[in-house]
Image (tube, helix red, strand yellow):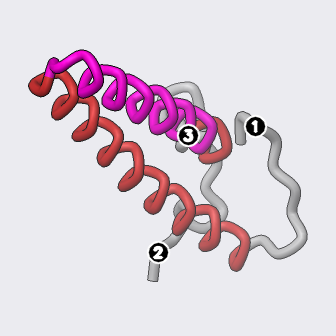
Amino acid sequence: MTRSQPRRARGTVGHAYSALNLRLGLALFGLVIMTLFAVLAFAVHLAWLGVVCAVLAAVAVVDLVIIQRRRAARHREQPGARHSLFE
């Protein structure tokens, strides 16, 4: 079972926990941009650059899956809690 973070633990300056909502936004941005760049690179016949951008887009998809699993775990542990972009 995936956990969002250890029970009763709070992030500190020395030991911060991931801001899942912010990571979600950044991963979505990376996915859109890298997909766009991959399409453009293939359109101008720069296959190597298109492959690099496609791989980075795939990494963003994997990150999105991990983030969503952790957000779901956080929701199960803290039902009804609202989290800001930076929590």
Point out the image quarter for the N terminus. bottom left
Disc on res. 33: none
Residue 36 at what x, y percent from top left?
44, 28
Q: CA distance from mark 2 to mark 1?
A: 21 Å
Q: Residues within 10 Å of mark 2 (few under 14, many from 20)?
A: few
Which element type, helix, strand or loop, lies under badge 1?
loop
Residue 19 vs residue 49: left or right?
right
Which residue lies most toward the left here?
A: 48
- Pointer 2 or 3: first along the chain: 2
- Residue shown at the point (72%, 71%) measured from the top left: 75
Q: Residues within 10 Å of mark 1 (few under 14, many from 20)?
A: few
Q: Residues within 10 Å of mark 3 (few under 14, many from 20)?
A: some
Q: Which residue bears the numbered disc 3?
A: 28
Residue 76 vs residue 16: left or right?
right
- Residue shown at the point (87%, 56%) measured from the top left: 82
Q: Which residue bears the numbered disc 1?
A: 85
Give the magenta range: 24-46
Q: Which residue bears the numbered disc 2?
A: 2
Q: Determine if the magenta segment contains residue 31.
A: yes
Residue 72 vs residue 38: left or right?
right
Q: Amino acid at mark 1?
A: Leu
Q: Amino acid at mark 3?
A: Leu
Point out the image quarter for the C terminus. top right
Residue 29 at what x, y percent from top left?
55, 31
Instruction: Tell which tag, 2 or 1, sits nearer the viewer.
Output: 1
- Residue shown at the point (40%, 35%) measured from the top left: 35
Q: CA distance from mark 2 to mark 3?
A: 21 Å
Instruction: Tell which tag, 2 or 3, sits nearer the viewer.
Output: 3
Q: Are marks 1 and 3 in contact (CB under 8 Å)?
A: no
Q: Nearer the viewer, residue 84 or 12?
A: 84
